[in-house]
Image: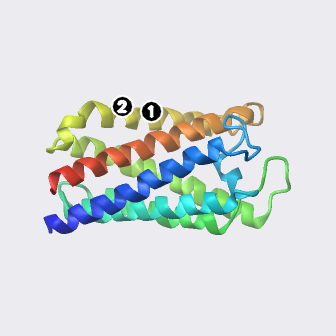
Amino acid sequence: MTATAFAFAILGLIGLVGYLGIFVALHVLPTGYHPVRHAVSDYAVGPYGSLFRLGLLVSSLGVAFLAVGLTLEPGAPPLAVSQLVFLYLVPLMRLGMALFPTDLEGEKLTNTGRLHYLFAIAAFAFTYAAISGMTSRLESLSPWQSAHGLLSTLREIALVSLVLLIVTLLPRLRKIFGLFERAFLVSTNLWLISVGILLAVKTT
């Protein structure tokens, strides 16, 4: 089981780090979108839409593989079944986001756009629910104890950015929504990568 958990940890890290690389690339390439004003999902509409969807795919696989690895080691318990279920649901929501592209700001809201927003909201909620619940439990275990400060800090950044991105849904603040959405995505992805690294260390 340990060797299997190690394999899933490595596969998860490949997906998560791959997503981070694609995320950075989308901000370097001439997409025409602004990192503060535009939502990340806007990258799905335009010449780099295929790259955005690839990012969602590798991210989804990364989270799914990590979830399997954590199910094997440390397992449930000490992790709660509900926390693992939340993590398993994240890839499904992200795939839904890829299948139903967003509507750009200012355009008429379509049924496809509404579905995208529902999947995105669910993905954010399940991601934070999993991270929020797992942090304290993992920090009591070796080797995650060594990253106590890092995991807690990333969780707090995720919480603050999640609250702020909800606040910036208001029309007057919409122009800075993208900033806090990106803070949430980066902090949660770094949390997952950190947990994945330590899972690989534990199962080596």
Q: Residue at x 27, y 48 (%)?
A: 197
The image shows a total of numbered marks equal to 2
- Label 1 is placed on what type of residue? Ile
139 vs 191, left or right, is: left
Residue 188, horizontal then vertical, whole percent: 44, 44
Tags 1 and 2 touching, CB below 8 Å: yes
Q: Quadrant of the N terminus?
A: bottom left
92 vs 4, left or right, is: right
Residue 87, horizontal then vertical, whole percent: 39, 59
> Depth check: 159 or 66 in front?
66
Provide the residue designation for mark 1.
Answer: 157
Q: Is residue 94 above or below residue 163?
A: below
Q: Is residue 181 above or below residue 9?
A: above
Residue 190, horizontal then vertical, whole percent: 40, 42
Q: Is residue 58 above or below residue 153?
A: below
* Residue 127 visible at all: yes
Among the 4 quarters of the image, the one containing residue 169 = top right
> Depth check: 52 or 144 in front?
52
Provide the residue designation for mark 2.
Answer: 153
